[in-house]
Image (cartoon, rainbow, N blue to C red):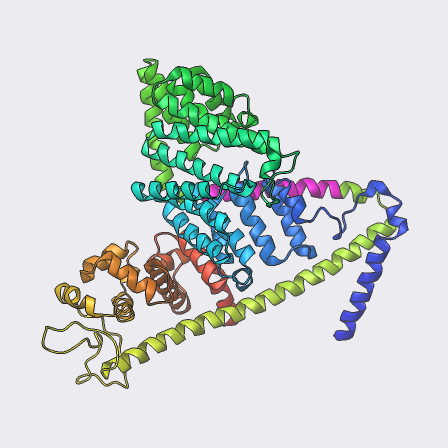
Amino acid sequence: MKNNSIIVFILTLLVLFGCTGKGIRSSESMGSSQPSDTIYTEKAALSIYATQPERALQIIDSAEIVGNLTDVKAEFLRAIVYSRSIESMQYDSAILIAERLMENEKVLANDKLKEEVLEVLLYACRMDQDFEQALYWATQLRDSYQEGGKETETLRIDAEIGTLLVNVGQQKEGMVKIEAVIQQLDLLSEPKSFNNLDATIIALKRKVEACFEMELYDEAIPTAQRMLDLLSDYEQHPAEFHDGHYREPSDEKRPDYIDFYRGKAYSYMAKSYASLDESDEARKYLALFEQTFASQSLTSRFMIAPTLGKIGEYARMLAIYDEMEQRLGNDTLNEYYAEILEERANAAEAQKRFADANRYLQRHNKLKEQLHTNLSQSKADLYAARFQAQRQQREIEQQREATRRAKMSLTVTGIFGFLFLLIAIFAVRQWRKTQQRNRILAQQITEAVEYKDKYSKLKHSIEAEGSGGYEIRPQGEGDLKSPTHDSQTTNPTEPEDHPLPPTPNSQLSTLNSQLTDADLFDYLHNLIEHEQMFLNPNFDRQTLIGRTGLSKERIGAAFAQASGYERLTSVVRELRLNHAVRLLNEQPEMTIEQVSQASGFANTVSFNRSFKAKFGMTPSEFRGTKAQTE
């Protein structure tokens, strides 16, 4: 077998040498791509991802296959494409990839790469309007910057945290934090540096966004004006700000940088004045905005459209919405289209077209409800559209390849046929390796769950003898004891799974201050597991509060400080997944959907995604692999 492999390898080298020889290269019209071609690079993908995300993903896949990218780098670039593409933003996919990368040892060992992944997570969560999760990742990113001694970067992310605090309802705390950042940056303003200038502009930008959230338009105007003053100073004296920082634009790119943020500031001024019913001032800054490069982007014009409506420029506003609707096409199941309908209703009402206004408002309300209830289906449609686009692109490339091959000589055709055979053999071998890996992985998953069950039973057997667990007894009758076994009535060598008895809330509340976080976590974990509270799809922290009478802060501290889990939801998700593994092993007649429901998941999509993220394969793959093994 080894000798055959050596022979195949030598023949492959001979064939590849023949493909790159003079006989082939003399025919420039063939255009056959080789793995070494520079098209399969990170630079090539990043140069087009904003407007051609599907093609960028294909380049990344190819670059990984030929060895130009590591698997970690390729995953990171995919997250970039999903989160920042102008044409097709898929924040959920970006978040899933980046969260998986944050569990990778190679990422955690590389501070620069970890920070880049955290930046993607922060951006994607913020754009997806998951502000609580964005705040979580922003805090981690800030800690990393601070540990690395990056003072300005730390201040930059502090301004981001301030805006997020405003978004989650902590408006006073958030605004105080942003103001503190701006004051600290002012202290660092001498000597001048681009890094400090850029951080100050970003902090001012975040303050304006917070002012809009709080409807403080009077305060937003001087903040945006200061952005304009800083940009003018930089434009007139660029040499004074030069510091060689990696974010500093080149001489050629400097006008674009200034123009971009100047356009942002003009749009902020226009929106503020329009909200204050000062239409003349709003029109003045709209005119200035339209002179910037930023105004040429449909996305920027879409953001300024509501301002046009506030000053009565309905025709211009509706023209932008017409253009955006044309861009959206049939893809109207999104927040962009909901905003368009709402603004159209406002315009119709202002023009006394009340029937149209009512019709647009009804459509808006229906769409918002549909967005809320059919989010899973919407994502499925998006993935289907992405798959269709990929398939069409593959078909086009296959047709082109067929045309080129038709012009080749019989010798070249034979060589490619031989190469195809080698690739097929390689693919089959890889498939077999994958099947073997999946079988091993499925067995490991099953053994891990069985081990956890045995460990749990052994633990409660020990607790029955008086050395663990916690049961709140009437005052004066003893300390915390095991809630699941009585050492006088239960044989400790034969542990059984008994439900936890109801714990008097008043007693637990009275003694909770005497418990360490570790003690309380053990009690709560036992409670959730043995009463199978996690099987309730609506189970959350409030359920646990109602069951125990503890405060959400006390419960949160127990899980955050005394466990390997960051949140209660992480514990619940793991218990549900372990339960699902048992059902998949023990109840082969149950469908995947039934297993999902029986394990406490809200829907099958969430179940599949969580299962794949934890175990590396889908529930269907796990079941199929187990079936093959048996």
Q: Is residue 97 left or right of residue 136?
A: right
What residue lies at 43% left-to-right and 46% top-to-bottom?
125
Q: Is residue 427 left or right of residue 177?
A: right
Quarter where residue 87 is shown = top right
* Magenta stretch prevailing secondary structure: helix
Q: Position of residue 30 (x, y in %)?
A: 82, 43
Q: Position of residue 611 (x, y in %)?
A: 44, 60
Is residue 378 at least partly visible in the picture? no
Q: Which residues are magenta?
A: 378-401
Quarter where residue 70 is shown = bottom right
Q: Quadrant of the N terminus?
A: bottom right
- Is 420 magenta? The answer is no
Q: Is residue 498 left or right of residue 576?
A: left
What residue lies at 17% left-to-right and 84% top-to-bottom?
489
Is residue 211 at least partly visible in the picture? yes
Q: Is residue 386 above or below residue 544?
A: above
Q: Position of residue 531 (x, y in %)?
A: 25, 66
- Is 380 magenta? The answer is yes
